Amino acid sequence: MGIQWDDSIRKTGTLTICRGNTASAWSDILIEAVSRFNDLATSLSLNVTFVATTTQPDPNNLQSTNVQFETADGKITFSWLGDQGSDNLPGDADKGLTRKGEVSNGLLGRAFIFVPRRTKRHRFMKLCMTVHELVHATGLSNDDHSSDLNPDIFSEYLVAAGDKVEAGIFNSRVMPPIWMSKETARKINTLWPYDPDSI
């Protein structure tokens, strides 16, 4: 199940994201991924969009940049409110990884996106990988991945195929264009209510 962001963040309807020092080679990918996500948000009436910023997140301040974007080549570490987290993502992986930090009420206060530093996959695969992790950063978990009967950008299985990307265990969705199902959009909007005054 997904986790909602803290009320103070959800009321804004936006998540700010900053590229970290390890991800300079992915700078243009991140910029385009934010644009592609926001295009999907417009077409599917999502209640959240992303805003890129150059302000690095403060690990002790809920109101600073919401999402940190980095690359990984093995062990990863991240810090939030005095706690240290760690995980592992090989530098040649075919997928990214998003980890989250909660505040005292159990809601989200920070998200950390990692993408593989040494991947040899083509640019569009990197773009799909990044948009997929942006969806995770809205609060959705692995349990929320799209169904193999109706796979989309949030499928657990994204596979590079020539200059395209196939989604789903049966490779039944071929991108481009980057495609998001109404079901994935519904799951996002469940975490992001339309009316900020209702929070």
Image (spheres, rainbow, N blue to C red):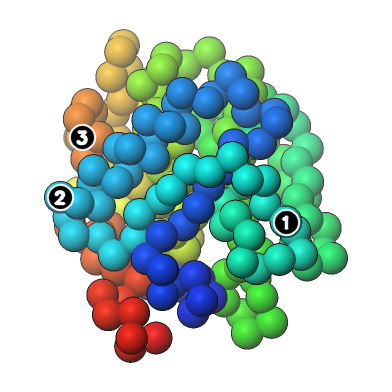
SS assignment at label 3: strand
Query: Closer to us: mark 2 or mark 1?
Result: 1
Question: Residue flagged by tag 3: what amino acid is it?
Answer: Arg
Question: Residue flagged by tag 1: what amino acid is it?
Answer: Asp
Point 47% across, 32% down: residue: 30
Q: If you read the primary sequence from the N terminus, does the residue marked by circle 2 or circle 3 appear first?
A: 2
Q: Which mark is residue 43?
A: 2
Q: Position of residue 153 (x, y in %)?
A: 31, 41
Q: Nearer the viewer, residue 97 or 109?
A: 109
Image marks 2 and 1: residues in contact by CB distance under 8 Å = no
- Report whether residue 194 is seen: yes
Q: What count of labels does the image hold?
A: 3
Q: Position of residue 75 (x, y in %)?
A: 78, 37
Q: If you read the primary sequence from the N terminus, does the residue marked by circle 2 or circle 1 appear first?
A: 2
- The residue where tag 1 is placed is 58
139 relative position to 113: left or right: left
- Position of residue 26 relative to residue 140, above or below, is above
SS assignment at label 2: helix
Residue 152 image-quadrant placement: top left
Q: Position of residue 143 (x, y in %)?
A: 44, 61
34 relative position to 45: left or right: right
- The residue where tag 3 is placed is 173
Point 57% across, 70% down: residue: 108
Q: If you read the primary sequence from the N terminus, does the residue marked by circle 3 or circle 1 appear first?
A: 1
